[in-house]
Amino acid sequence: MTEIVITAPNDAREVYRHKQLRQALYDAGEVVMEDVVVNLHGDDHRQRRRLENRLFRRDTFFEYERDMFPTIIQDTVDPYLESGEAELVDFGHQLMMNLAALTAGVDRPLGTYEETSRLYDYLTTFIEGATLGFYTGDVDAKRTEIEEKLEAFDKEFLEPGIALRKELLEKFERGEIKEEELPRDVLQVLLRNQDKVPMTRESLRREIAFYLLAGAHTSATALTRVVHNIFKWLEEHPEDQVKAYSDKVFLQKATHETIRLQPSSPTAARWALEDIELKSGIKIAEGDKVIIDLETVNRDKATYGDDAEEFNPNRNLEPGVTPWGLSFGQGMHACIGQDLAAGLVFDTDSTEENHLFGLVPVAVQTLFLNGCKPDPDNPPEMDDSTTRPYFGKYPVVFSQIREK
Ligand code: HEM
């Protein structure tokens, strides 16, 4: 087997869109990822994706961002604001998990701190499951632990969630409740279509666990990195201090720039199902593994300028250039939650009132509008349990000074 590394944007786009290139990134993470949407191919993928697309539409995202997320964000951040400090890695995962639970359809009927902590513990294990290929400890022991946690998660969270949604569906079919009264989440969509696209309980369990981690982990790691990049930027560019602590569009651009430079997954990978020649002449043989090196693709100087390697939240781009590069993928597996996570590009027709900012920018805004600064006594640390470049701890303090 040969590994072919793609570094040019046009080749990357072609690889993402090629029907004979199959997902290869999660082979080691099958305990959670075996048959989840990002790992399916061909008709199986199309069927599942078509169902889930029904939920992931712009009007739903606006509803989430306007009506449902603000309370969750406020409730999550308030205790930290009161204490005047936060550890961002934990805070980011808590916040993004609370939001991802809502989109995935994981209810917390008790609403207690302990219940949320248990869900958080499951999420942490599922993240380890999906990234098992990069795990530095005992992989077999970890796999067994993940299997046990999946079953426990099912019992505590999925089972009652399924029962509730089935009941609501029956009421809906009897005309006792309206369509709008059904939960707007992945679990409800999948259950409603069980007759057309049946899924086993194990598949359903993995899909919901995947949605929880796909929504929470990517967004949480992005959050910490954006905050870090802004702090570093301000050391060199104190003239942007006021913007950083008041300008929502600046904070959204800082988020997009961070996602371009530090994609949640630094590579994409595909298996070639047949011999392929890309338009640029690159030859791929059946059975080869194709790796898209996103960090290089996203730093293309012809697209992003001579300083493409640098973080620059004031970067101006030609129309049509995506500020986040290819960090949300393209083609069949293109991120279903992209607009939800990062919002839309703020253009000449946008106003702050009608704009979809995205949940990562909104979380960054919440931190900066509350005067978030690095903790002078506790420097950030990296996470050494994985070979991926994640922060392990990122302490911040809130000065509460809101500059206008
Ligand atoms: C900063 C945040 C995020 C980033 C950088 C990101 C990135 C990505 C990337 C690169 C892919 C494609 C993987 C591939 O082609 O191999 C993807 C797929 C996916 N993402 Fe995201 N994502 C983010 C947030 C979210 C959120 C918030 C959700 C859910 C609410 C989500 C759900 C998904 C799903 C379900 C897929 C699989 C789609 C399919 O296979 O058809 N993501 N994401």
Image (spheres, helix red, strand yellow):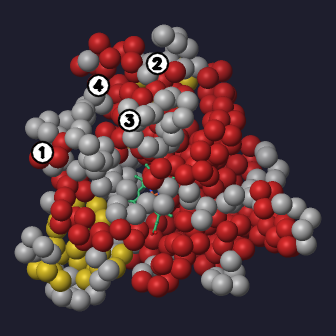
For the N terminus, which image quadrant? Answer: bottom left
Identify the amino acid type marked 3: Asp
Secondary structure category for the residue under label 2:
loop
Q: Earlier in the sequence, mark 4 or mark 1?
A: 4
Left or right: where 35 falls relative to 24: right
Asked which secondary structure carries label 4, the reply is helix
Q: Which residue is mark 1?
A: 301
Which mark is first along the chain, 1 or 3? 1
Amino acid at the residue labelled 1: Lys
Q: In this rendering, is residue 129 above or below 27?
A: above
Q: Mark 3 — residue?
A: 347
Checking the image for residue 233, the label placed there is 4
In which quadrant of this rendering is ligand 1 seen?
bottom left
State the image quarter where residue 51 is shown: bottom right
Q: Are marks 3 and 1 in contact (CB under 8 Å)?
A: no
Q: Residue furthest left?
A: 281
Residue carrying label 2: 246
Report, in whole angstroms, how far the alpha carbon at label 4 lies from the one at label 2. Answer: 15 Å
- From the viewer's perspective, is residue 326 above or below residue 258? below
Residue at image coords 51%, 40%: 356
